[in-house]
């Protein structure tokens, strides 16, 4: 009985009994100005519009004297001077719970799929800090994408964050949908930001399909949504993923795309009076990107492996958003327009892409095979013009000969149909045949590098082993001794 009342008592204790209200005094571009309500930056307010008997949510962006400046999350058709504004007492929070699976929500967490209300009781803050770096679990488990070239050459670890970079129409969204369908992560959380309505529909109905949707949550802010909705959709996506990570899950987060997120903040920053800096982007954009991206990765309970799509303006890899995102992540997959034009899909450039954590989750023999394969690809590319022009004489170099012999098979290995699912067994078997390096079955496991020691462990082991002999020969030690140690350690690593 007591427990029954406790529920209501705690509600009464936390309920704000005073309503803080204000009134619209001006609308300037995207910004609404009002007299009151008493509120904090980021607080969510409801604006009542008697003209069409509707309401719209707005976020407090700043203050000027007694004026509160707000940005609306929806249409402001019907707004007029004097409209009442009611402060909610909290910043943007996202409804979370298992019921979110299979649902499509907007930036504020409202369902937009016509499947009724969400029926959840818990909320997570949309704007939050990154996990403490010390408490993060190690990235030691392989997360599969079902994409052959990624699972072999650019293997992902749990909690790794990668960018997919390309100009428009090169296959970023298609690659994301292939990963969403095929990954072995427990849950997909997908943020579609600034996409056209048709693309969103295609993604949900055609690409994800009913099966994919069952273990996914999709957060949508289309290109016609107000800039604050497009911006916050990225935060809502991250908050939903954080909830599932706290349940101990391995989450796959996908953001399509970060450039639209940056555009949204550019619009907001400029309209709030910030000065444009690089390519018109105000400084706040470059502050927000790392803060948002740092929130994914592992924490002490679970992991969020993340793929962030970046639309590279004019295929210029040095443009500021591309540069900033690339520098913040643990790897980048670069798509090449040239490959897409040749219908080589996925159009991943094998020589320009990198996965910084791949070594941690790749078996020793697989690593050897991957190195060999990368070398064959690089040698072919280096000599491509000579080979194509017919200038290269077979027999001049055994390595170039091998690269030419294997070229067709390598191309076949790197290409994959959109709806093809490549298992890790099949991928590693094909890699083994292609490179003629045997890959034992233990390396198909989730943690193929578990037995392998890190550089630090190797150095430690080496020191321990040599402590006696080092003491004996200490007087004779010189710089060549150090060089020998280094070469011994590196050969020990290669032999692992
Ligand atoms: N794996 C693939 N297989 C076949 N066609 C593809 C593949 N990936 C992309 N495409 C083609 O490229 C077009 C654009 O891809 P999309 O993923 O929408 O590009 P982006 O998101 O980079 O703008 C698609 O409509 C499709 O015709
Ligand atoms: Mg796209």
Image: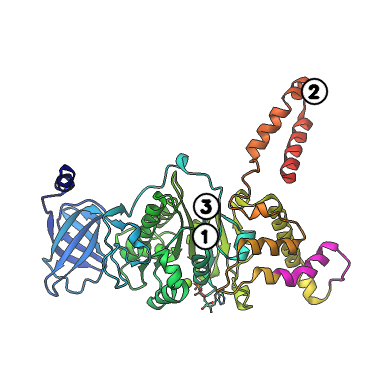
Q: Viewer-proximal residue, 131 or 486?
A: 131
Residue 368 screen position, x and y as percent: 72, 53
| Magenta residues (range) | 392-410
Residue at mark 1 to residue at mark 3: CA–CA distance: 11 Å
Q: Viewer-proximal residue, 439 or 286?
A: 439
Local SS, label 1: loop
Q: Which residue is mark 2?
A: 476
Local SS, label 2: helix
Q: Residue at x 71, y 68 (%)?
A: 410
Local SS, label 3: loop
Q: Which mark is residue 235?
A: none
Q: Viewer-proximal residue, 384 or 421?
A: 421
Q: Do labels 1 and 2 touch, CB within 8 Å?
A: no
Q: Nearer the viewer, mark 3 or mark 2?
A: 3
User: Would residue 223 be counted in the magenta stretch?
Assistant: no
Whether residue 369 sits left or right of residue 146 in the image: it is right
Residue 432 screen position, x and y as percent: 72, 60
Q: Which residue is mark 1?
A: 184
State which tag comes first along the sequence, 3 or 2: 3
Q: Magenta region's main secondary structure?
A: helix
Q: Which residue is mark 3?
A: 158
């Amino acid at each position: 009985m007591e427990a029954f009342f406790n529920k209501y008592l705690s509600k009464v204790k936390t309920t704000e009994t005073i309503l803080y209200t204000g009134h619209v005094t001006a609308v300037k571009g995207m910004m609404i100005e009002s007299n009151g309500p008493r509120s904090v930056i980021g607080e969510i307010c409801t604006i009542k519009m008697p003209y069409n008997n509707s309401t719209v949510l707005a976020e407090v962006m700043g203050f000027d004297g007694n004026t509160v400046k707000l940005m609306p999350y929806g249409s402001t058709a019907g707004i007029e001077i004097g409209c009442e504004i009611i402060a909610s007492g909290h910043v943007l929070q996202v409804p979370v719970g298992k019921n979110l699976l299979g649902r499509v929500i907007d930036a504020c967490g409202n369902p937009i799929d016509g499947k009724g209300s969400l029926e959840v009781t818990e909320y997570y803050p949309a704007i939050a800090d990154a996990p403490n770096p010390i408490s993060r679990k190690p990235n030691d488990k392989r997360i599969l994408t079902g994409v052959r070239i990624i699972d072999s050459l650019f293997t992902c670890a749990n909690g790794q964050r990668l960018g997919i970079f390309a100009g428009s129409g090169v296959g970023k969204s298609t690659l994301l949908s292939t990963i969403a369908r095929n990954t072995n992560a427990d849950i997909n959380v997908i943020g579609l930001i600034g996409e056209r309505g048709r693309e969103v529909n295609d993604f949900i109905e055609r690409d994800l399909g009913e099966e994919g949707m069952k273990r996914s949550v999709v957060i949508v802010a289309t290109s016609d949504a107000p800039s604050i909705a497009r911006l916050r959709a990225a935060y809502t996506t991250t908050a939903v993923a954080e909830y599932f990570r706290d349940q101990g899950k391995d989450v796959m987060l996908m953001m399509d795309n970060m450039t639209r997120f940056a555009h949204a903040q550019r619009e907001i920053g400029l309209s709030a009076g910030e000065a444009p800096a690089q390519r018109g982007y105000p400084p706040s954009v470059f502050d927000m990107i790392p803060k948002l991206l740092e929130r994914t990765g592992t924490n002490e309970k679970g992991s969020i492996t993340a793929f962030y799509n970046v639309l590279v303006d004019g295929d210029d890899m040095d443009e500021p958003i591309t540069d900033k995102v690339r520098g913040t992540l643990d790897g980048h997959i670069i798509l090449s327009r040239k490959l897409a034009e040749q219908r080589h899909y996925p159009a991943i450039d094998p020589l320009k892409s990198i996965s910084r954590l791949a070594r941690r989750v790749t078996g020793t023999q697989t690593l050897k095979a991957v190195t060999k394969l990368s070398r064959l690809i690089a040698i072919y590319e280096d000599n491509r013009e000579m080979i194509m022009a017919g200038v290269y004489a077979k027999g001049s170099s055994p390595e170039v000969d091998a690269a030419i012999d294997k070229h067709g098979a390598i191309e076949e290995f790197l290409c994959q149909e959109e709806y093809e699912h490549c298992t890790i067994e099949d991928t590693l078997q094909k890699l083994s045949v292609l490179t003629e390096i045997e890959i034992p079955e233990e390396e198909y496991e989730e943690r193929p590098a578990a037995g392998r020691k890190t550089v630090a462990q190797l150095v430690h082991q080496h020191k321990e082993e040599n402590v006696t002999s080092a003491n004996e020969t200490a007087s004779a030690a010189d710089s060549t001794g150090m060089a020998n140690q280094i070469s011994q350690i590196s050969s020990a690593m290669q032999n692992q």
